[in-house]
Image (cartoon, rainbow, N blue to C red):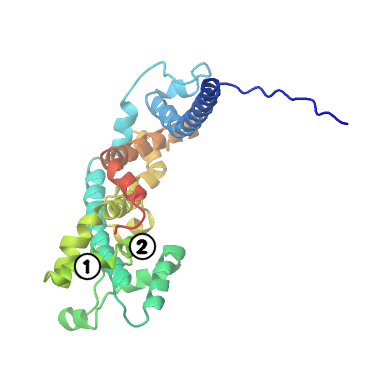
Amino acid sequence: MKTNASQTVTVKPAGKRDTKYMVKSKIKKYSVSIARGLLLFGLCFMIIQPMIIRFCSSLMVESDLYDSTIVLLPRHVTLENYKIVADLTSFPKSMINTLWTSLLVSICQVLACTLVGYGFARYSFPLKKFWFACVVLLIIVPPQTIQTSLYVQFASFDFLGIFTALTGGPLNLRTSIFPYVLMSLTCMGLKDGLYIYMLRQYFKSIPKSLEEAAYVDGCSTMHTFVKIMLPDAIPTIASCFLFSFVWQWTDLFYSRNFLSGYSIYSVQLSSIVSRMSRYFNNGSDVAVVVPNARQQQLIFVGVLICSIPLIILYIFTQRTFVESIAMSGSKE
């Protein structure tokens, strides 16, 4: 006969198992937190480091640029570089023109794109898919492809022959803000396709029951849109406004084509190198060759001046911007 040897099973107390599990959980939690913190620190450092280097460089005199012993902090601190860049870029006139132009264009774009995005999300009309495909093309096709047609259209602008009948010929609108405003109001401005797509996707996520309840209470279509739909869409609208303002602030394509009659900061900054030799010759007939390091330093100063208003704008709107990204799911 075979006898089975008795086996002794040792059972650990429940308290020890729970303590071991809690220790492992805390180690895992802290490890993930440390790894995430290091990753965020590395990303932030990659973004902030160039700004710190450029700022320190902007405070250096020209001799410090060629001093190999200087790594980051300048030996001789000066603010003369900011004054030079301000003279070369017609500051503050160019900054004021850029500010009100960006505000005007952004407001026009947001107004038009909000209405169009709501129409695509809620209404059916002939060739709806075709027109939305055209909206997608606005995102994909670069504006440089229609540069010639834009030039011809606004250099000899004549809507249905009205201006020819009134003034005897077409109007040249290329040196004014009107072409840009017209394009923004008709959703043909800078990045308008993206704003329409964002707003259309948001309005589609809102349940129709909210509008139906408003209609039952006696609200009209416009009243429902203004009182029910727009308040919930404020974060998305604010994001579109933020994108529009930033892109218009640094735009060169449309500013050169339509705003040549204005002093725009981005345009002035793009041609700052061509004006340096005339600025530094002090009225003499001898051309001054500006060293490349000096050119780069002044360009960095101009970029910093251009970035400061955008940084301030992001600081005050970051909560609304993050809220628009975080908004998801059904609103039932």
Q: Position of residue 46 (x, y in %)?
A: 48, 33
Secondary-structure class at tag 1: helix
Check the image and report above or below for 120 versus 92: below
Residue ranking furthest to the left: 218
Check the image and report above or below for 18 versus 236: above
* Mark 1 in CB contact with mark 2 (< 8 angstroms): no
Could you say which is closer to the camera, residue 325 or residue 88? 325
Q: Position of residue 267 (x, y in %)?
A: 35, 49
Check the image and report above or below for 284 versus 235: above
The residue at the point 35 percent across, 19 percent down is: 77
Question: Mark 2 belongs to which amino acid?
Answer: Gln
- Residue neighbourhood size for the residue with mark 1, other residues' Cα within 10 Å, grouped as few (<14), some (14–19), many (≥20): some
Check the image and report above or below for 174 versus 313: below
The quadrant of the picture occupied by the C terminus is bottom left
Residue ranking furthest to the front: 1
Q: Is residue 259 left or right of residue 131?
A: left
Q: Position of residue 208 (x, y in %)?
A: 27, 68
The residue at the point 42 percent across, 72 percent down is: 133
Q: Is residue 103 left or right of residue 8?
A: left
Could you say which is closer to the camera, residue 117 or residue 98? 117
Q: Which mark is residue 211?
A: 1
Q: Quadrant of residue 218?
A: bottom left
Residue 257: in sight, yes or no? no
The residue at the point 23 percent across, 79 percent down is: 169
Could you say which is closer to the camera, residue 109 or residue 231? 231
- Which residue is labeled 2 in the image? 201
Question: Mark 1 belongs to which amino acid?
Answer: Glu
Q: Earlier in the sequence, mark 1 or mark 2?
A: 2
